Image (cartoon, grey):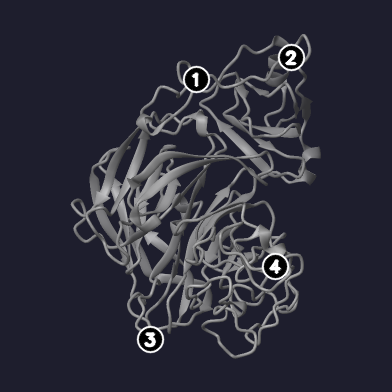
Amino acid sequence: MVKRSDWASYACLTLLALAGGARAQQKWTYPNCPDVSSADFTKVVLVNKIKDPTLDEPTRMDFAADGRIFFSERGGKVKIFKPSAPGASTGTIVVAGTFDVYSGINKDGSQAESGINGFVLDPAFASNHYIYIDYAPKNDSAWHVSRFTMTGDMIDMASEIMLFRVGTQRVHCCHTGGGMEFDLKGDLWMSLGNNTANPLVNADQMSFINETAQNGIGDDQGHAANTNDLRGKIIRIHPTPDGKYTIPEGNLFAQGTAKTRPEIYTMGHRNAYTIALDKYRGWLAWGDVGPDQGGETEEHNLVSKPGFMGWPYFVGGPGSHTTSDPASATYSYRGNKNPAAPVNNSINNTGLNNLPPAVPAILPYKESAAITGPIFHYDGANPSRTKLPPHFDGKWFISDWNNGQGYLKVVTLNADGSAVTDNRILFPNNSMVGPISIKIGPDGALYVVEYGGTYFATTGDTKIARYEYKGTCLPETPTLPTTTAIAARNRAAAPAMVAEINLGSNRVVDMPEAAKGFRVFDLQGKSVWQYRAAGGRARVALPAYMGEGLYRVKFEF
């Protein structure tokens, strides 16, 4: 990624408006295709109990560039689906590693949710073979986040290097988190659940908040609202080659701040079980599983900066269960706190008393278990014919576990990601049985881990499926005739050329003949979009979600 200070080292070129002055914005066209529906997709089952008789509670997946699909089972196994040919639905399933995890019964008799909480492949997995795993070892009351090295299809268990350890309670269920993703800078983002005994609540019963008595299990002010504890958080760290990590700039608390953990990016989560990154716009999304109190206590969230998300004092949006305090109208549930200046006075709190202002959910609703999927960016250079069409460019996929009767929604956001402008169903209820992990594969297709409809069990409905787009709204990368003047300047420019473009009516980039692609940066040096092709002069339309203003384009040769 190019830093802002590096711009002076490049020869700059201004892309001028096309001859004749401002023109209408170039747009994608969909011949005979005004919209896309579930009828345009074919569901292909890759893994189920028939193909893998030992399949047991799959919860997470990730993709290697060579076509292998990695998935983890809560009970301790990491497995790999190896397709028989690129894109094939048949293949072999191998066990890459088995972990001795804590996944059974808690001390109070409740079912534990821990085990393998999550995993992710290193961005340079093809060369370094690193895999990061968040798991609960049986012999330590904690979550371990460790790096392992793989040899072929096998995890070298002796290669473990622990990045960090989070102490946990094992008396009562629930909430592990475990969402893990890397961004374009190599920063690792991951969610950690609140690990607190959270019973059913209503507007008058705050049994998960206890400010006067020592209650390390039931008081979430010692976990999610504690600035000095990693539980109930989404963290951002930068793993280093020696198996340790550094802290990126811009997290919620600066390094050295007393009674805080610098790893924290967002806090005040109950169970942000799934997360997603918009790697080009720098947005973080997650689904936060709320209490079963009957109001709009489920949350889909998206932020572009760190903050305190409110739990356990505030949750959801306007709903049927509100307190008598009129200021609670922003939330479905509100404790006796001021959202603008919440204070954590609990005896169980080891962090700061004064917390950052609470941030309401961007999309609260009434359901059972919020699951976030990816924010999609269309790649016209991807040769796959089953990839999602550009209709979904910049859109956010979300779902809900919903007692095993899941759907898939498509959310449209405004330019800065601060508000939802459209929210509609693509796959209706019962299309997916317990969606628990939703990803976009390297082929641009949609993949879903369907856990099934029964808690802590694997049934005939349990599967990993690929939803292949079969519609006709899949144009090739848009190309328009280039103007002689711009094409000549591009061909004559230095290979490391950076172009400036002011996005207004002109939303196209003229790519030099020898270029293999380009990356678009905002003025702060943040990568916001990239395009790759096999080469050849082309005029490429930029996505509609990029707001007007000045951007810089670096061509790749």
Mark 2 neighbour class, 10 Å CA radius: few under 14, some 14 to 19, many 20 or more:
some
Establish if 326 lies above or below 512: below
Where disc 1 sits, the SS reads: loop
Where disc 2 sits, the SS reads: loop
3D distance between C-alphas at marks 3 and 4: 38 Å
Q: Which residue is mark 2?
A: 18
3D distance between C-alphas at marks 1 and 3: 58 Å
Disc assigned to residue 30: 1
Q: Quadrant of the C terminus?
A: top right
Mark 1 neighbour class, 10 Å CA radius: few under 14, some 14 to 19, many 20 or more:
some
Q: Amino acid at mark 1?
A: Tyr
Label located before the other in sequence (1 or 3): 1
Mark 4 neighbour class, 10 Å CA radius: few under 14, some 14 to 19, many 20 or more:
few
Label located before the other in sequence (3 or 4): 3
x, y percentage for residue 415?
Answer: 68, 38
Q: Nearer the viewer, residue 348 or 168?
A: 348
Q: Amino acid at mark 2?
A: Leu
Label located before the other in sequence (1 or 2): 2
3D distance between C-alphas at marks 4 and 1: 51 Å
Label located before the other in sequence (4 or 1): 1
Q: Which residue is mark 4?
A: 325
Circle nearer the viewer, 2 or 4: 4
Q: Amino acid at mark 4?
A: Asp
Q: Which residue is mark 3?
A: 107
Q: Nearer the viewer, residue 117 or 105?
A: 105
Residue 263 relative to residue 146: left or right: right
Q: Residue at x 35, y 74 (%)?
A: 103
Q: Nearer the viewer, residue 510 or 114?
A: 114
Residue 66 shows in this picture: no
